[in-house]
Amino acid sequence: MISLFVALYSLLCLCTAVKTSDIKELHVRTVKSGEDVTIACDLSLITDKSKVVWYRQSFGKVPQFFAKIYGTNNYTFTDGFNDNRFSFTVNEHQFDLNIMNLREDDGGEYFCGEMEGTTIKFTSGTHLQFEDKEMKLCPSPGPEIKITVSGDDSWMIYSLMTFSIISVIVIVVLVGVLFQNHRKGASSRIPEISSNQADDEDVLNYAAVSFAKKPSSSRTSRDQRHEDVYAQVQIK
């Protein structure tokens, strides 16, 4: 749950800092561990080449600024980023990222863009994924896939996310209401069962009283004659 929240938060942060129309195509590169890879950054769309920067975003993390152009054809890494496997090819037309001996933690999105005040105008983006993980999702991967992202579709994504959240909340509320009604119905049936049992006991008692036999009159008369004979004998 926490990982999902972080991923959604990272996506929202990225969308607020970047206009989706700035990135026309997101390139997907499928690589293997131990390989070398070059990720291109075309400077033809950059207004001020001295403000070109590189960002990367690993899954579940916020975008990380890690390199920028320095001087004419040089570059510098940000403080805290120290990995000699990373280097750049810098000239008038390109600021390409080179990664040697790829590791699985190198997977993610890499973005090249231009700083404009406090915002970033990304001009290219590449998703780096490893072949073994990609094979689990798709049995026949292609060498390179291009995904077109339109800025006009961003409202649809937000609408779907909002609708999904509201649907989950409504389902949880309905389940709670049904559970409460079930408990109330079960508790209301208990007094009714008790009263029915009491009525059954009264009926049985009444039947027992009604079917009690009275002593026969013939036996009563015989007993009376015996008593008369006994009385006569005593008198004599």
Image (spheres, grey):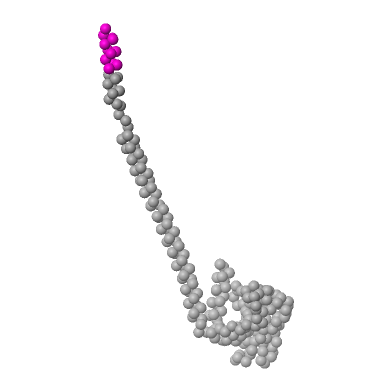
| Percent position of residue 201, x then y | 36, 40
| Percent position of residue 28, x then y | 63, 81
| Percent position of residue 107, x then y | 65, 76
Residue 89: quarter of image: bottom right
In-image side of 235 versus 61 (left or right): left
**Res 80 seen here:** no
Farthest residue in the top direction?
236
Q: Quadrant where the N terminus lies?
A: bottom right
In depth, the one of 191 and 6 nearer the eye is 191
In depth, the one of 49 and 16 nearer the eye is 16
Residue 92: quarter of image: bottom right
Farthest residue in the front direction?
218
Residue 179: quarter of image: bottom left
Q: Residue at x 45, y 67 (%)?
A: 170
Magenta stretch in the rendered image: 225-236
Report the magenta stretch's main SS. Answer: helix
Q: Residue at x 38, y 52 (%)?
A: 188
